[in-house]
Amino acid sequence: MSERVAVRKTYKLFIGGKFPRSESGRSYLVQDSNVSLASRKDARDAVVAARAAVKGWAGATAYNRGQILYRVAEMLEGRRDQFVALGAPADEVDAAIDRWVWYAGWSDKLPQVYGGANPVAGPYFNLSAPEPTGVVAAVAPEAPALLGLVSVIAPAIVTGNTVVVAASPAAPLAAVTLAEVLATSDLPGGVVNVLTGRLAETVPTLAAHMDVNAVDLTGVADAELAAELEVKAAENLKRVLRPAPADHDWYADPGLTRMTTLLETKTVWHPKGV
Amino acid sequence: MFEYAPAPESRSVVDIKPSYGLFVDGAFVDPTDGGSFKSVNPASEEVLAEIAEAGNEDVDRAVRAARTAYEKVWGPMPGRDRAKYLFRIARIIQERSRELAVLESLDNGKPIKESRDVDLPLVAAHFFYYAGWADKLPYAGFGPDPKPLGVAAQVIPWNFPLLMLAWKIAPALAAGNTVVLKPAETTPLTALLFAEICQQADLPAGVVNIVTGAGDTGRALVEHPGVDKVAFTGSTEVGKAIARAVAGTRKKLTLELGGKAANIVFDDAPIDQAVEGIVNGIFFNQGHVCCAGSRLLVQESVADRVLESLKRRMAQLRVGDPLDKNTDIGAINSAAQLAKIRELSEVGAAEGAERWSPPCELPERGFWFAPTIFTGVTQAHRIAREEIFGPVLSVLTFRTPAEAVEKANNTPYGLSAGIWTDKGSRILWTADRLRAGVVWANTFNKFDPTSPFGGYKESGYGREGGRHGLEGYLNV
């Protein structure tokens, strides 16, 4: 009996809940697979998809968003071995799963921790509450590819933002596989969009895009490129998360800054009276 | 309009020196290159004082003084002692509030009733509020032991000179930072009096440094490699330049920039209250307010009634001597700002909007602009898109709540908004959809030290006031 011929997977982009090839028709070889080489046009298409998803996702209840993020953890747990087979250390996969669980719980707690009533000196009701800033363009760190990717996506979307993320160019297989997890977790299409390919090609387009509200430069290791991207981001005053230091501990408690930098605080006043 | 006898506030409470140096390391010093400029009273064009202009070397000296104070004195000082200095400053401001209010009105042109009843009480309250945080930072929600950043470079505008100083300095000092602050070149006097208050409070030298000057001084300060934090309030254009200047550094940046706020009046709003809110929204402080309600969005069915009441009310506004206690609208802050307001108003008329001002006699000397409204404004008009920063209101109409929200959000800015309606659920529905940092419902232009203030989109980032205001000055 002859050995079974394996069915190989095509690794494509993840835009608007679908898995298209790059519109440029290009690919690059990583870990024996042809991976889509995203173009500037793909980046712009991803922003359009992310913008279209903002209304529904930001308008979803915090409870609903928390449930969906937890569902991502469930799906990831089920595919644990697949990520290990792609080369992620088991403890990294476990940490990535746990990170989804951690962030899932923040959806309906951050507004209480980060907002609240303000005791103004007058007869006014005054309440501050955080809101998502909108579309976030993020650059995942090169390593750890899976945990790093999860650590930039989850804090952005848990509060209602949508994301276009440039995956680590050296480890795109984990990113595309994570996109498959997201696609089967009831996450609405367009909330997370994943680009694979060269950072220098897609990220400047995202940083300069006038319909992007924030950039997360976490994974930009080249200091010169990071500064250039921050200059582009200034054109419409995008909120900026600067690159993580090289010795950043991805396994440590992430804290709130990754979430709060991508939030706006809205304060509403109303007089009290009869 | 009733004729009132003049009721001028006395100038004798202030003692303006002929010239002022820079406040560096606890003392007033001459600038290295001896440059200076004049600050004038915009209501009379009288020169008030000669002000030192800080060059690169002066800025460097101030930053080094702030660094030394941070490392040697203010950083190591227990929070409870920092708190006491801030409480002292708050008390001295209360004690000298009339002097500060008169000086503010002289230098800025704003009516004394506003500097006396709005600016100064808020300034004192702001220091009092943040004083209490200095020894409670572990409870502020930024972790058990949040650290200051170091030296803060702060650049403030001319519309609320002392209040903007308070918004910058109080949280910075409470969090344990030291500061170098540059007041606006047209309104440096209350900041320099504040420097004297720091001396009176025995605040350690170098904790607060005041460098006066114009754009070049501000640029030197923001770009100085020795600062850890940049806080700016001013125009969106300069804010973007600053964001570019700090790119690639580790400087933490907060920006409070321009606005083009929509003030939305629904058909069930109490008209008289709404009209008071519209007037307060755009004519408070001559409209020199980044969060001014400069776009009136009024529901079509009540537009005629609202405009009729608004015009009647505008005819009662008293424009004139800022030091007169009956004055509602004072002087435009500078000749340059007046030129900008005139230019945009002319563009408004040229683009087809209908211009109206009440009969209004303006003083001969000084910089003045009558309260003005434009009706028939469309979203494409420049007066509906650009910040005029003067007493000029653009009136647009809408039919449905969804259209109101769409128009309100159709701007690159997102600082503030107003909603006038009797229906609670409509307030909350509308407030949820407005992309603005402060939403005033059935009120407008209210401020409080406990209430976070700041914008969405191109109105900047970060919040000033409240617990949120500490975040910009902590290493979190």
Image (cartoon, coloured by chain):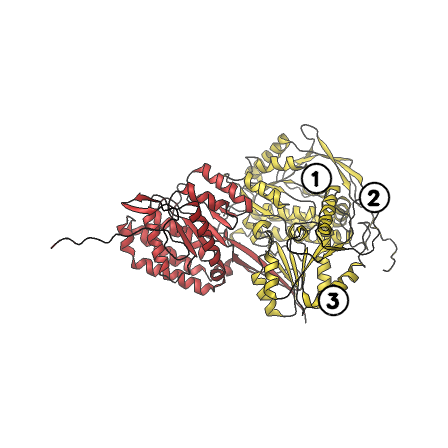
Residue B213's place in the image compared with B367, above or below, is above
For this rendering, which residue is in front, A94 or A50? A50
Circles 2 and 1, Cβ within 8 Å, touching? The answer is no
Residue A141 in the image, given as x and y percentages of width and height: 39, 45
For this rendering, which residue is in front, B372 or B327? B372
For this rendering, which residue is in front, A53 or B457? A53
Callouts 2 and 1 in the same chain? yes
Give the Cα separation between the discs numbered 2 and 1.
Answer: 21 Å
Chain at numbered mark 2: B
- In the rendered image, which residue does mark 2 sit on? B365
Of all residues shown, which one is farthest toward the bottom? A274
Numbered mark located on residue B305 in the image: 3
Give the Cα separation between the discs numbered 2 and 3.
Answer: 36 Å
Amino acid at pointer 1: Glu
Residue A151's place in the image compared with B196, above or below, is below
Crowding near the residue tagged with mark 1, few <14, some 14–19, many ≥20 C-alpha atoms within 10 Å: many
Amino acid at pointer 3: Arg
- Left-right relation of A242 to B437: left
Q: Earlier in the sequence, mark 2 or mark 1?
A: 1
Question: Which corner quadrant holds the C terminus of chain A?
Answer: bottom right
Q: Nearer the viewer, mark 2 or mark 1?
A: 2
Q: Colour of chain A?
A: red
Numbered mark located on residue B185 in the image: 1
